[in-house]
Amino acid sequence: MPRAIISPSVLASDFGQLTAECKRMMKDGAEWLHMDVMDGHFVPNITMGAPILTSVHKAIPDIFMDCHMMVANPIQWVDDIADAGGALYCFHIEATSDPLSVIKKIRTRNMQVGVAISPDTPSTAITDEVAEAADMLLVMTVHPGRGGQKFIERCVPKVAELRARFPEKNIEVDGGVGPKTIDVCAEAGSNVIVAGTAIFGAQDAAEVIKQLKATVMTAQAKFAAKA
Ligand code: DX5
Ligand code: ZN
């Protein structure tokens, strides 16, 4: 199974100190930083776009920006995000009728590919062909649009279903994930953990990152023992 990765969502950070917040997370053990891009169409909110990512990348050239694109027209932003230094471009399957063309475009720009599903979208919306062409599958555990929402537990079986179909893919969970909700996610087979409020809101972010990662690794050891 792919390794455990913690990706703090900067949506919960102090945007006025964004680069300092990203550096702090990397120092505290985060390998990826989760950048929530919203366009006011796919979701009602607007957050940040390519110009901000460009600045962050300029300040921290070795950052891995895990870009979660909550946008109505995913193919439109591929070039901008690639130029801004995005490492992974994760788009929503609900936002396109032609996911393979979006994936092809992302590949031409040498970014990793992620495919996301919202809480009301079944895991079967990600076909074998689409999943095989992607590096990561994202199961949202809140409705996309804002941070600090309550974890929706009924989404967890989708993680298990995707893990059974795709043992080697990265499977990310995002929304309401923290020390209280990580267990079910890790046991279902998620290995990439996004957490905003739970990490940025903590007294000791390094400790939370360590704990989330350890929980995933323990679950993985159990999977390995069973196999
Ligand atoms: C929601 C975003 C999430 C969000 C997670 O639309 O995709 O990444 O920032 O924040 P928490 O962990 O606070 O639920
Ligand atoms: Zn997100």
Image (cartoon, rainbow, N blue to C red):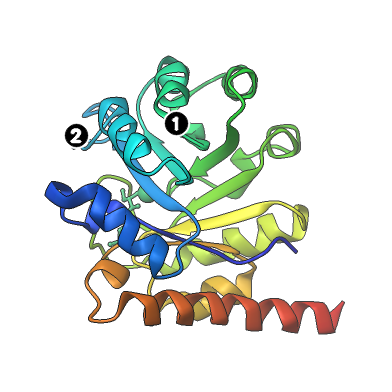
Residue 77 image offset from top left, x and y in percent: 40, 20
Q: Amino acid at mark 2?
A: Ile
Residue 224 image offset from top left, x and y in percent: 81, 78
Whether 168 is drawn above or below 75: the answer is: below
| Residue nearest the observer in this picture, 48 or 99 | 48
Q: Which mark is residue 85?
A: 1
Q: Quadrant of the N terminus?
A: bottom right
Residue 80 image offset from top left, x and y in percent: 40, 19
Image quadrant in which you'd find residue 69: top left
Of helix, strand and loop, which one carries label 2? loop
Q: Is residue 79 left or right of residue 165?
A: left
Residue beneath the point at 64% across and 68% down: 189
Of helix, strand and loop, which one carries label 1? loop
Q: Quadrant of the C terminus?
A: bottom right
Q: Earlier in the sequence, mark 2 or mark 1?
A: 2
> Can the viewer see residue 139?
yes
Whether 108 is drawn above or below 85: the answer is: above
| Residue nearest the observer in this picture, 202 or 129 | 202
Mark 2, mark 1: which one is toward the viewer?
1
**Label 2: how many Cα within 10 Å (few below 14, some 14–19, many 20+):** some
Residue beneath the point at 44% across and 43% down: 65
**Label 1: how many Cα within 10 Å (few below 14, some 14–19, many 20+):** many
**Is disc 2's CB within 8 Å of ligand 1?**
no
Q: Is residue 223 left or right of residue 134?
A: right
Alpha-carbon span between mark 2 and mark 1: 20 Å
Q: Amino acid at mark 1?
A: Gly
Residue beneath the point at 23% across and 58% down: 12
Q: Which residue is mark 2?
A: 46
Residue 143 image offset from top left, x and y in percent: 33, 51
